[in-house]
Amino acid sequence: MPPRLKDDIERFDRWATTYDQSVWQRRYFLPIHSAVLDLIDGMQAVAPQGSVLDIGCGTGRLLRTAALRWPGARLFGVDPAERMISEAARLGPDVAFQVAGAEGLPFPDRSMDLVVSSLSFHHWADQSQGLREIQRVLRPGGAFALADHMFWPGGLFNERIHRHRALDALFAGAGLTVVAHRTMRSRFVLLTMAVSPRSAKPASAQQEISRAPV
């Protein structure tokens, strides 16, 4: 495990029991969660009975909000911080939570209708591998909604942040097609919606997709 990722996990484990009481929840995280879910609803990207996965779910707050919007959905959450998952399971007993990172999702191929990730992408050890895993678990035509930082000072802290064109290229390399970007003004956050191909393609064809221009 890369040292930086190990440090991140340990920091979030220490934060787990007070995470939901943080002032950042009301002022920063919750508005972003709402914006992600609004974007999904606006594009009709998930069926009410679909399977929804949140990567980097923390204490599961986004999924608890999603449960109110989509009461028929099957909800899943993964996070590499074990204590975050313990809190999530305690607070959201109707959601299936597991300890895992984006780079190795513990789900079968084509098992998810929608994948979301909110403000965790810059922590991923291998973003390209994580996106390939998302493409693997998405059903044909499934959607991925991402919210992450895009402000330049993040680079000073070695955060792996990206703007529109860089994200388009990363997504295309994993076989995902970006269909929308939205910027949250004054919050320096970029919302991105992408879709998985509707028809199954052999590995050789998928490699051709990854080389296609954006």
Image (spheres, helix red, strand yellow):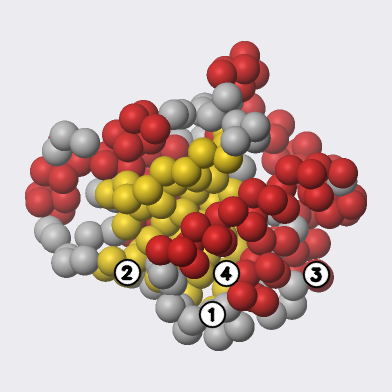
Q: Which residue in the structure is indicated by mark 1?
A: 73
Residue type pointed to by label 4: Phe
- Gap between marks 1 and 3 measured at Cα: 18 Å
Q: Which residue in the structure is indicated by mark 4?
A: 76
Label 1: how many Cα within 10 Å (few below 14, some 14–19, many 20+): some
Q: Which residue in the structure is indicated by mark 3?
A: 91
Task: Please tell me which residue lies in front, 69 or 139.
Answer: 69
* Badge 4 vs badge 1, beta-carbon distance below 8 Å: no
170 with respect to 186 (left or right): left
Task: Please tell me which residue lies in front, 106 or 214.
Answer: 214
150 with respect to 198 (left or right): right
Q: Which residue in the structure is indicated by mark 2?
A: 139
Provide the secondary structure element on which disc 1 rests: loop
183 with respect to 175 (left or right): right
- Gap between marks 4 and 3 measured at Cα: 14 Å
Question: Which residue lies at the image location 65% right of the left edge and 66% below the top edge?
Answer: 63
Residue type pointed to by label 1: Ala
Relative to 49, say whether 27 is above or below. above
Label 3: how many Cα within 10 Å (few below 14, some 14–19, many 20+): some
- Gap between marks 2 and 1 measured at Cα: 15 Å
- Gap between marks 4 and 1 measured at Cα: 10 Å
Mark in front: 4 vs 1: 1
- Gap between marks 2 and 4 measured at Cα: 15 Å
Give residue 66's quadrant in the image: bottom right
